[in-house]
Image (tube, helix red, strand yellow):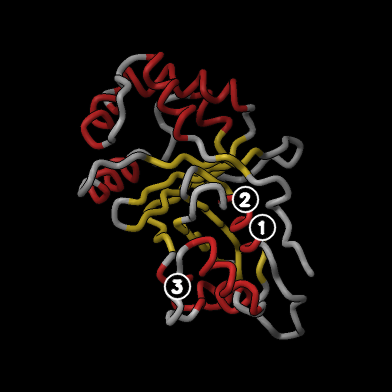
């Protein structure tokens, strides 16, 4: 299975509607590509949709465009140009996987999925991707390393997101990260690359940044809604 991520711009207030639209899928026929939703997240003006598929990007796009109302929804909610086919629009929305870390998952523990949307300064997306990719493996903290199942950097130009799966609950995870990042030198580098008001070299500043940039998971995003 190949993991594919789409990042779509969305009109204000339409984020949840677009997220639901992207989870629609017709029943698969024998021999066709199989697609499974992994997670869907929203942020103001943005939807992140992640799926595993045997057909790659083309398979995911084919599944999504099976329904004629998908094209109408993308035009209404995302501002897709009327003359642009929905398939072309979704292909352009792909986020490239720039770095990935994964380890075996202890089945006895539940996995939480989260995403962070980085507020990148104009033209700094490439430098941020390199910085995040260099530290994709959690080598700085035993607590982080033991809780992290996978972490992936997806990006397209200055749109950069981190998607990760972990066994820690959100409060415990933030405590662990906030103890490490501000003092590691990473906080100072992020200050230069991100358009934020907080000082990411401080515990309070990093916590405010992390909380404000965390994307909201869409309930039920782990399964496709079949009409």
**Between 94 and 127, the one nearer to me in the picture:** 94
Q: Secondary structure at mark 2?
A: helix
Q: Earlier in the sequence, mark 2 or mark 3?
A: 2
Circles 1 and 3: CB distance less than 8 Å?
Answer: no
Which residue is denoted by mark 2 in the rendering?
Answer: 16
> Relative to residue 218, is residue 72 depicted above or below?
below
> Relative to residue 23, is residue 136 depicted above or below?
above
Circles 2 and 1: CB distance less than 8 Å?
Answer: yes
**Which circle marks residue 89 in the picture?**
3
Quarter containing the N terminus: bottom right
Give x and y (percent) for residue 194.
Answer: 28, 35
Q: Earlier in the sequence, mark 1 or mark 3?
A: 1
Give x and y (percent) for residue 3.
Answer: 54, 61
Which residue is denoted by mark 1 in the rendering?
Answer: 20
Q: Residues within 10 Å of mark 2 (few under 14, many from 20)?
A: many
Residue at the location (79% across, 69% down)?
227
Q: CA distance from mark 2 to mark 1?
A: 6 Å
Q: CA distance from mark 1 to mark 3?
A: 17 Å
**Which circle marks residue 62 in the picture?**
none
Q: Secondary structure at mark 1?
A: helix
Residue at the location (64% across, 27% down)?
169
Residue at the location (62% across, 28% down)?
168
Q: Residues within 10 Å of mark 3 (few under 14, many from 20)?
A: some
Residue at the location (51% across, 76% down)?
86
């Amino acid at each position: 299975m190949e993991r594919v991520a789409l990042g779509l711009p969305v009109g204000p207030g339409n984020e949840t509607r677009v997220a639901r639209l992207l989870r629609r899928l017709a029943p698969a026929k024998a021999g066709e590509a199989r697609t499974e939703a992994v997670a869907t997240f929203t942020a103001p003006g943005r939807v992140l949709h992640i799926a595993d598929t045997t057909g790659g990007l083309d398979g995911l796009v084919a599944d999504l465009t099976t329904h004629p109302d998908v094209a109408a929804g993308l035009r209404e909610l995302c501002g897709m140009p009327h003359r642009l086919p929905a398939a072309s629009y979704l292909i352009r929305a792909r986020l490239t996987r720039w770095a990935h870390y994964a380890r075996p998952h202890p089945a006895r523990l539940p996995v939480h999925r989260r995403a962070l949307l980085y507020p990148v300064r104009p033209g700094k997306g490439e430098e941020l991707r390199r910085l995040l990719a260099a530290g994709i493996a959690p080598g700085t903290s035993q607590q982080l390393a033991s809780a992290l199942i996978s972490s992936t950097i997806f990006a397209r130009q200055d749109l950069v997101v981190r998607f990760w799966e972990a066994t820690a609950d959100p409060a415990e995870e933030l405590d662990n990260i906030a103890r490490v990042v501000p003092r590691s030198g990473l906080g100072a580098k992020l200050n230069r690359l991100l358009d934020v008001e907080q000082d990411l070299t401080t515990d309070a500043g990093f916590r405010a940044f992390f909380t404000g940039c965390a994307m909201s998971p869409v309930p039920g995003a782990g399964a496709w809604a079949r009409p």
